Amino acid sequence: MSEGNPPYKRVFHCDHCGYEAQVAGERYLDKGCNNYMETFVCPDCQILYESIVTEITLHKTLPLFFEMKEVFPDFNLDLPKEIEGDQSIEPALYADHDERPESKCLRCGNTQGIKWTKENPICPKCSQLMRTKKIE
């Protein structure tokens, strides 16, 4: 599993049927949305897609709240009044990653996606092995 965005998205190509997809093929942390992503196969569309596999749970009693308030004065997490002005709160983790129960196909919305990895690159269209292709 990569910590941080993957160095590049790989293009996986099937020589047998010509199907191609640009995906990471592994679990990685997308720092832009601060969630973990994985590659899936849609059993209906027979395509590869990436989906968020975790949800962020923000803790409301954190220093991050105060930093956000400085940058965005209207930012509000509905903190209790006794906490809102107290910047001496002990630092805590500002987020937990909870596993999401399902992924969703970007094309049809199917929630029965099957995890797909570069270690077992089976083509979702014809079940032959896919290979990585250089991006030019």
Image (cartoon, grey):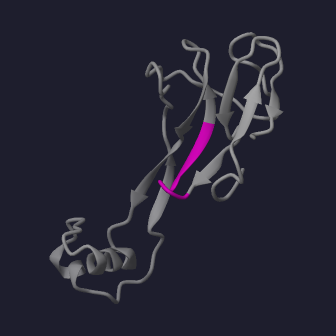
Residue at image position (66%, 34%) is: 22
Whether residue 36 appears in magenta in the rendering, the answer is: yes
x and y percentages locating residue 132 in the rendered image: 81, 33
Which region is colored magenta?
31-38
Q: Position of residue 39 (x, y in %)?
A: 63, 34
So how many labels did they put on this image?
0
Residue drawn at point x = 60 percent, y = 53 percent: 29
Q: Residue at x 54, y 12 (%)?
A: 44
In the displayed structure, 76 sits above or below 52; it is below
What quarter of the picture does the C terminus occupy? top right
Tell me: 82 left or right of 128.
left
Residue furthest to the left: 81
Is 131 situated left or right of 59 in this image? right
- For this rendering, which residue is in front, 4 or 10? 10
Q: In the figure, is residue 107 to the left or right of 37? A: left
Q: Residue 24 appears in which quarter of the rendering?
A: top right
> How far from the left and from the top, in percent, is residue 13?
76, 25
Asked if residue 39 lies in the magenta stretch, the reply is no
Name the residue nearer the viewer: 108 or 64. 108
Relative to 107, residue 80 above or below: below
Check the image and report above or below for 110 versus 1: above
Residue 8 in percent (x, y) is at 70, 49
